[in-house]
Image (spheres, coloured by chain):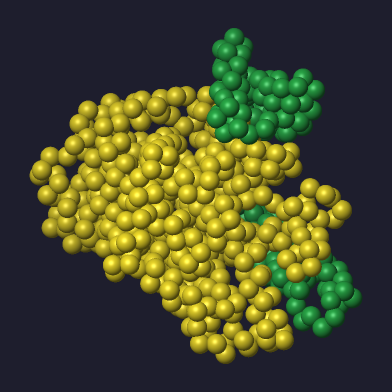
Amino acid sequence: MVDVLGQLAGGFGAALSPMNLLMAALGALLGTFVGVLPGLGPTAAIAILFPLTTVLSPVPAIIMLAGIYYGAMYGGSTTAILLNIPGEVASVPTCLDGYPMAQQGRGGIALGIAAIGSFFAGTLGVVVLTFFAPFLADQALRFGPPEYFGLMVLAFTVVAGLSGGSLVKGFSMAVLGYFLSLIGLGPSTAEPRFVFGWTPLMSGVELIALVVGLFAISEVFLGLEEKRVAIATTIRNVFPRLADLRQAAPAILRGTGIGFLLGLLPGCAPGVTVFLAYDVEKKISRHPERFGKGAIEGVASPEAANNATSSAGFIPLMALGIPASPPLAVLLGGLLVYGLQPGPLLFQKNPEFVWTVIASLYIGNLVLLILNLPLIGMWVWLTRIPYGILGPTILLLAVLGAYTVRNSMFDVAVSVVFGVVGYFLRKYHWPLAPLLLAFILGPLLEKYMIQSLSMSGGSAMIFLQRGVSLALLVAAGILLVTSLVLVRYTSRRVKQETAEEMAL
Amino acid sequence: MRVAREGQGKVVGGILVLLGIVAIVEGVRLHALRTEMVAGAVVGDDTFPLIVGVALLLLGGAAALVRLPSATVTFPRGATRARMLWGLALLATYWLILSPVGYTASTALISVGLFRAMGGYRWPRALVQGAVTTALLYLLFRVWLLQPLPPGWLGS
């Protein structure tokens, strides 16, 4: 405990440096800006802004990415409340009562409650991360290759949670992601694989080019098609009255609890917990008939759950290297790009980095609250930039971002091709997050599998003979079933509320 | 334009099966290479491609045969479709000309085209927006982020 507090204090010392503070603020601002653009969610926000962080050293880069993540989450709530447009499925319940509140002229109050709820839940999540993640990482230190393989299989169960209702689609996309990760040089003999004599393929598919194509370029084309409109509302007061706060506080607490506890399960995305939080709130309310007509609890609870789950997701991400949601999968990719392998060894090898990032999460939450409440008017104004200007600018930014990572025209081609592929896959509701997750985890899964099988002389029994590895495989099975139940429930609820399918 | 989604499983399933065959063929090639090069190794660079190949075949088959959630997908028509196709064509052109022509000229040209085609702005406004965007992106990538951009024939 004292040790953790000491390390956290050291982390704060580093995170409070002017450069890191600037990156946290810049990340929160940029993230909110992109997140507030109608239809663009946190995943697209990180995808668009990811290349810009690659020139920074790892600590400020990850701090900025985390700020972008938090900012985009909050920006998504703004469009859900003011425009009834959820950037991602996690914002759907916020629309249900947030938009009616905006129609009643209480949009500012809804945004204020969303910001306060998000801050509370986000901060509480980081507090638990501070104490729980090192413990988890400590346990995982005894892992050998078979245990890591079990961990990667556990991570694979996340695919079920990200499948958007169809397991065949989810797992198909995941295997496609594994296939793409194989392109390049083989890890054992450095023999070119799937290169077919074409030199650019030797260095493999670049993660950032893939992310930019799948999530940023495809998003622009979808936005163009949907004729996204600017927010016409004028926001005056965003500071809730005491009565509003009193009414929302229990809902924030409950939402935080639900979001956090479920968020600890690898594979439980915010899209799942927000609906549970909303439904629980409605069920225990004395006036359930108010829900859907502008109940403040209907905004407070899912918003808190959303942020609590997002913060809780940092625990399996940092301690075990398992991302629970699409934006965290992109963030995991970010860590790998900077040469940092999330997981137990990260706490051992790069403690300064880990504790600086954890401290910056506290700061990021606070910066977001301080910046966003007074700046809501500006965000609303910025959304009036026509899509005819935003779309081309995002496209150029994305393409140049993909180019500058390796100064490679091949990467530009990859981003454009996957932009088109991503557009069609999204149109037909094939989930992209499993593809990305498998692309990131593929090389690790392969490495640990090869090492384990080399140890056992080719016998797969090694995974069942070692206690921890077996336990992880059993846990993966249990989590898979749990995820399936939760995904079914959420898919049904999303369909009820939006009459369509959405990836979780 | 509304397109039924029933055919989607067959299309994606077919592509996955094709990729599965490619993965297995490549796995077999690598397997032969491993047994030739590394004596006694039980696993190697071929193991994962073979597993992924089999998984692609199985899932591709499942995607083609299993009944996926049905609904209809609407594709844009008319002006919107034209805007999207122009945008895509301009992106592809950007990929072709960025390296030989260089950052400044190619970005100015493509950004004007994108503002005109996707935003529907008149030529004078598209020209101004294109010039401003080119300058801002140059500032961001070259001046602030210190990233090299293709100089091309024009040397900038």
The residue furthest left is A243
Up-down: is A4 above or below B2?
A: below
Please state the total of marks drawn on the protein image. 0
Query: Which residue sits at x=39%, y=39%?
Result: A18
Q: Position of residue A380 (x, y in %)?
A: 34, 29
Q: Is residue A420 left or right of residue A29?
A: right
Left or right, residue A27 beside residue A260: right
Q: Quadrant of the N terminus of chain A?
A: bottom left
The percent coordinates of residue A32 (x first, y second) are 39, 38
Residue A223 percent coordinates (x, y): 52, 35
Q: Nearer the viewer, residue B96 or A366?
A: A366
The hue in which chain A appears in the rendered picture of the protein: yellow
Q: Residue at x 63, y 34 (%)?
A: B147
Residue A181 position (above or below residue A299): below
Quarter of the image holding residue B41?
bottom right
Horizontally, is A104 left or right of A91 in the view?
left
Q: Determine whether A85 is above or below B137 in the image.
A: below
Residue at 62% of width from left, 66% of height from top?
Answer: A444
Q: Residue A191, percent across and down?
A: 81, 63
Going by the picture, which residue comes out furthest to the bottom?
A465
Q: At 66% from the left edge and 24% from the top edge, which residue is drawn? A: B107
Is residue A8 something that shows in the picture?
yes
Q: Is residue A181 or residue B144 the one in the foreground?
A: B144
- Chain shown green: that is B
Image quarter where the C terminus of chain A lies is bottom left
Answer above or below: position of A371 versus B53.
Answer: above
Which residue ends up furthest to the right in the rendered image? B36
